[in-house]
Amino acid sequence: MSDACVELELLFIVVKDYHQRDQILEGFLELGISGATVIEARGMAQVLARDVPIFAGLSSLFPGGQNDSHLIVSVLPVARHAEVGRLVEDVTGGFDKPGSGIMFAVPVTAVSGLAEFIC
């Protein structure tokens, strides 16, 4: 990598509450992050309960499984991870409670279509 290259990660944030989704996206804008994709998703418990009737009674075993999920995906410089983590923590109160959400990142080794990150 040259000095102009930036180490990137693909950040995934899953929340159940659409208010939290909106607050996180507003926080992204305040942090100068202008790119994210939001995908409405269903968790394993919802799929099993709806599509496989034999599992309908087991949905209570999956915390938070009754609500739709909101998946926020964004390619960000690794250096921004801590501040985004603080934002998500402030908005959600953390993900310590099972079924409340999750945040994780994976390294991005190649990218096209994001001119500001192409070396």
Image (cartoon, rainbow, N blue to C red):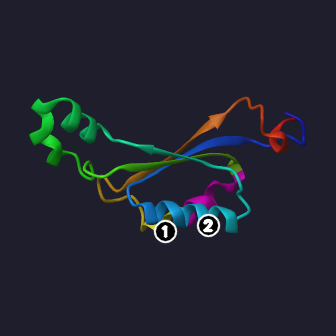
Position of the N terminus, as image quadrant, is top right
- Disc 2 on helix, strand or loop? helix
The answer to whether residue 79 is above or below residue 27 is above
**Quarter of the image that includes the C terminus:** top right
Q: Nearer the viewer, residue 24 or 67?
A: 67
Q: Position of residue 31 (x, y in %)?
A: 70, 65
Neighbour tally class for label 2: few under 14, some 14-19, many 20 plus, Cα within 10 Å: some
Identity of the amino acid at label 2?
A: Gly
Quadrant in which residue 83 is drawn = bottom right
Which residue is denoted by mark 1 in the rendering? 91
Residue 44: assigned label: none
Look at 59% across and 61% down and name the residue there. 25
Q: Amino acid at mark 1?
A: Val
93 in relation to 21, above or below = below
Q: Are marks 2 and 1 in contact (CB under 8 Å)?
A: yes
* x then y, percent, for residue 114: 78, 39
Residue shown at 19% from the left, 38% from the top: 49
Q: In the displayed structure, does residue 19 sit left or right of residue 105?
A: left
Note whether 77 is above or below 30 in the view shown. above
Residue drawn where x is 70% and y is 30% of the image: 109
Is 83 colored magenta in this rendering?
Answer: yes
In the rendered image, which residue does mark 2 sit on? 27
The answer to which quarter of the image holds residue 55 is top left
Residue at point 81%, 41% (across, down):
117
Q: Position of residue 51 (x, y in %)?
A: 22, 31
Decide which of 8, 54 is in the foreground and name it.
54
* Magenta range: 79-87
User: Which secondary structure lies at badge 1?
Assistant: helix
**Up-down relation of residue 17 to residue 53 (above or below):** below
Sequence-wise first label, 2 or 1: 2
Gap between marks 2 and 1, in whole Å? Answer: 9 Å
Q: Is residue 23 magenta?
A: no
